[in-house]
């Protein structure tokens, strides 16, 4: 049995994972922390859930004794974190619990600094510039930010962090899902043995991992490829069932991440596509009405108010959509849109458009004549 198999058995006693893919990713991430000097990127691992009591903190708790130089932190200052990363003893493995509290409704300078650290530090060589006062002299220094980071928190994290993370959506256990209570003083000896086994295995895997260019599954590209390549390299070095399991986990978790709730702008583009149905043109007034008639859509009450033409113009202009279009309707000039105005944005931001016409298509026999 390989050290990765043993780690999987160990942590599986205490954590109820939402899927086998989540368990696979957790084990591979722990192993990658022992080989972090081999990689150009280090994916963040984010245990998130909509409610407390879903096993997020427990997942970090069982991670701590298995990774090199763990630093468990709650609400630490960025300056503390930067200096831990610069420790001459070696790169730490940062474990942030309750990380959602840092990124509240009112971002502070401290939270923005920490977000910058988490964003930049997933890539080797990243630094943060700081001005420091030494005596009467103001000097600059570059602080490294690259290290392995795992987080636990409620709901969402900033999108810039989410795209650099392997996200595991934790859930409360069913009554039928039984896990053991984790007691550090009971299980610490076994955890230390597994940590040593991972260190020894990592020594033998360094050359293979450093020189590897793993074949990634179809659809794992761009930022997702940066995130998953280190873990798949670890899996290939481990052999056995791990290479296929890692690739299956990558596809599963990437697809799951892409199914997250859309931003308001993308939701607007998607709902406009449904509202237009097969119509080739639509007046602004009619488009607003159709959007507000969608029962499950938010457009009838955004911050307590119905959307209007100004809301459309403000939000659609961000996607390069011309919002100053005039048509003639029954001889009267009116504002409106054609499908051509949306096609490029739909192609870029709505990758799987619905083929259903919906309840609004071809509901009018009006003839529109383009004026400008």
Image (cartoon, helix red, strand yellow):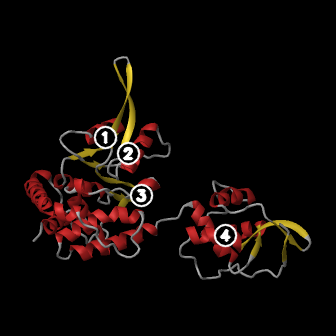
Location of mark 3 (residue): 162
Q: Which mark is residue 342?
A: 4
Q: CA distance from mark 1 to mark 3?
A: 20 Å
Up/down of 13 relative to 66, above or below: below
Q: Is residue 95 above or below residue 6?
A: above
Marks 2 and 4 in Cβ contact (< 8 Å) = no
Q: First in sequence: mark 2 or mark 4? A: 2
Q: Are marks 1 and 2 in contact (CB under 8 Å)?
A: yes
Disc 3/disc 2 C-alpha distance (Å): 14 Å
Q: Quadrant of the N terminus?
A: bottom left
Q: Nearer the viewer, residue 5 or 144?
A: 144
For label 1, the SS is: helix
Identify residue for label 1.
Answer: 81
Label 4, secondary structure: give it. helix
* Cα–Cα span, label 4 and label 1: 45 Å
**What residue is rendered at 72% in x and 62% in y?**
322
């Amino acid at each position: 049995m390989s050290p990765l198999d043993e780690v999987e058995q160990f942590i599986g006693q205490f954590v109820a994972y939402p899927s086998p893919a989540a368990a696979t990713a957790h084990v591979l991430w722990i192993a990658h922390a022992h080989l972090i000097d081999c990689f150009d990127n280090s994916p963040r691992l984010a245990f998130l859930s909509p409610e407390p009591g879903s096993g997020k903190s427990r997942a970090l708790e069982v991670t701590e004794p298995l990774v090199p130089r763990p630093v468990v932190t709650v609400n630490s200052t960025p300056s503390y974190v930067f200096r831990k990363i610069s420790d001459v003893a070696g790169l730490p493995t940062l474990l942030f619990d309750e990380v959602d509290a840092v990124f509240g409704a009112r971002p502070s300078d401290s939270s923005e600094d920490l977000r910058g650290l988490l964003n930049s530090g997933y890539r080797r060589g990243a630094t943060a510039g700081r001005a420091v006062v030494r005596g009467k002299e103001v000097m600059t220094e570059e602080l490294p930010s690259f290290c392995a980071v795992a987080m636990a928190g409620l709901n969402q994290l900033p999108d810039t962090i989410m795209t650099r993370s392997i996200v595991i959506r934790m859930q409360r256990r069913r009554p039928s899902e039984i896990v053991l209570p984790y007691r550090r003083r009971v299980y610490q000896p076994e955890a230390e043995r597994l940590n040593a086994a991972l260190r020894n295995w990592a020594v033998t895997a360094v050359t293979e991992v450093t020189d590897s260019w793993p074949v990634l599954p179809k659809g794992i590209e761009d930022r997702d490829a940066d995130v998953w390549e280190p873990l798949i390299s670890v899996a290939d070095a481990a052999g056995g069932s791990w290479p296929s399991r890692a690739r299956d986990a990558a596809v599963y978790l990437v697809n799951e991440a892409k199914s997250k709730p859309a931003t308001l702008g993308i939701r607007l583009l998607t709902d406009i596509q449904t509202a237009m149905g097969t119509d080739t043109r639509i007046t602004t007034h009619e488009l607003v009405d159709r959007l507000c008639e969608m029962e499950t859509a938010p457009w009838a009450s955004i911050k307590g108010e119905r959307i209007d033409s100004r809301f459309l113009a403000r939000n659609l202009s961000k996607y390069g959509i011309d919002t100053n279009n005039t048509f003639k309707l029954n001889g009267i000039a009116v504002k409106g849109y054609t499908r051509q105005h949306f096609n490029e944005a739909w192609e870029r931001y709505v990758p799987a458009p619905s083929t259903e016409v919906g309840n609004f298509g071809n509901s009018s026999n009006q003839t529109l004549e383009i004026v400008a």
